[in-house]
Amino acid sequence: MKKVITLILIACLFMACNENAPDLNKDISVPVSVMEVKPKSIEKYITTTGSVTPEKEVSLRSEISGKYTLLTNPSTGKPYMLGDYVKKGDEIIFLEDEEYENNMKISSLKLHLEISKQVFDKQKSLYEKGGVTLSELKNAEIEFINSDYAYEDALIRLKKMKITALFSGVIVDLPYFTQGTKIDANTLLVKLLDYSKLLMELNLAEKNINLIKVGQKIRIMNYTIPDDTLSGKIAQLSPAIDPETRSFKAIVKINNPEFLLRPGMFAKGEIIVASLDSAIVIPKDIILSKQRGNTVFIINKGLAQERIINFGLENPEEVQIISGLEKNDRIVIKGFETLRNRSKVKVVK
């Protein structure tokens, strides 16, 4: 009998606990973190990737044969080497060929030019005084012009002995040759790149063709420069769609004044297609997608209130809210997953 009474008491206590359980749960406050909604700027951008190439590059080859001499870089005091920066017009390599130089007869051509100029000037003076005929004057002029052409041609051929930088840039290839050895014509001697400005070729999705315009800004990032973002702009656009990839081509010009990006690197780009300076903007990862629409929770008098929101501009991280939220609303950013409308909450950091 005592056992029966004990079991009845236990059952009663269990039923009483269950009846009071819902009331206890009503007093539970869900810990949440909040942020106050403040107007801020937002950009809509298209993310893309590509490899960068230098705007200027040149491979310099020997136009004549001659004895190879690698010259000294005046800024380092050492022979030119890979990675050296050179200025436009700097002489990097000299090819010596005495026979070639002698055959040009630079000195005699220069002297002949000076004499023909004197004769032409004298004939002009005499012609004005009636001392020579027009035919004699023209013959003197022809001789002077031919002498000038011959001398200029010799100077052009003389420059072939010098390998000079066509623009300011960096030496990226410098094949080794023993000083004084004879180099054949058409031998690669040095390769220069100027990558203070870079180009990046993009293939963009067909759906974006009406959003992309020449001149639009683009941010350029690379994992090797996590703390720096380079600027660029859309320089060229193809109006044609590739039928196989359903994409169109764009060329981006990138400013790289500190040489942070290197030619051949893989880079990420963000093409800015629209922006607002002052808007209600929230993170995308706090938005709940429900059957009746996209929702968030705000806090009002210690209770969670569910709000249905509508989007404006958006990007992968943030979205503009055009309805559903107001300035200074306290929006839940952590702990919202288990909330219900009018749930009691406790704000924590």
Image (cartoon, rainbow, N blue to C red):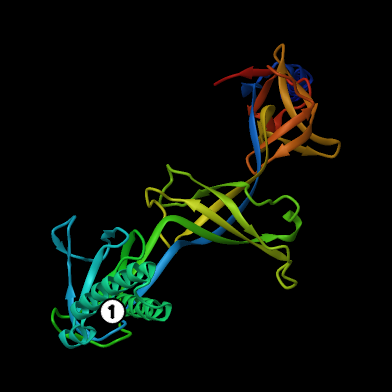
Q: Nearer the viewer, residue 14 or 328?
A: 328
Out of 170 and 324, give the one closest to the viewer.
170
Q: Residue extending furthest front?
A: 130
Residue at the far top: name it. Answer: 301
Image quadrant for the N terminus? top right
**Percent x, y for residue 331?**
68, 23
Q: Nearer the viewer, residue 226 or 2?
A: 226
Q: Is residue 141 above or below residue 302?
A: below
Residue 244: tell me if it is visible. yes
Q: Amino acid at mark 1?
A: Ala
Q: Position of residue 246 (x, y in %)?
A: 73, 66
Q: Quadrant of residue 166?
A: bottom left
Q: Split into 4 quadrants, where in the image is the C terminus? A: top right
Residue 6 in view (yes/no) = no
Near mark 1 (Cα within 10 A), the count class, few <14, some 14-19 or many ≥20, is: some
The vertical placement of 216 against 192, above or below, is: above
Q: Position of residue 296 (x, y in %)?
A: 74, 29
Q: Is 110 on the left or on the right of 218, as rendered?
A: left
For residue 345, above or below residue 270? above
Q: Label 1: state its secondary structure.
A: helix
Residue 205 on image: x %, y %: 70, 59
Residue where numbered disc 1 is placed: 154
Picture quadrant of residue 250: bottom right
**Is residue 217 rendered to the left or right of residue 226?**
right
At 21% across and 78% down in the image, what residue appears?
A: 106
Residue at 56%, 56% (x, y): give it. Answer: 252
In the picture, residue 87 is in which quadrant?
Answer: bottom left
> In the rendered image of this protein, does residue 266 appear above or below residue 345?
below
Q: Residue furthest right?
A: 292
Nearer to us in this view, 125 or 144: 125
Residue found 20% across the figure and 65% down from its top: 80
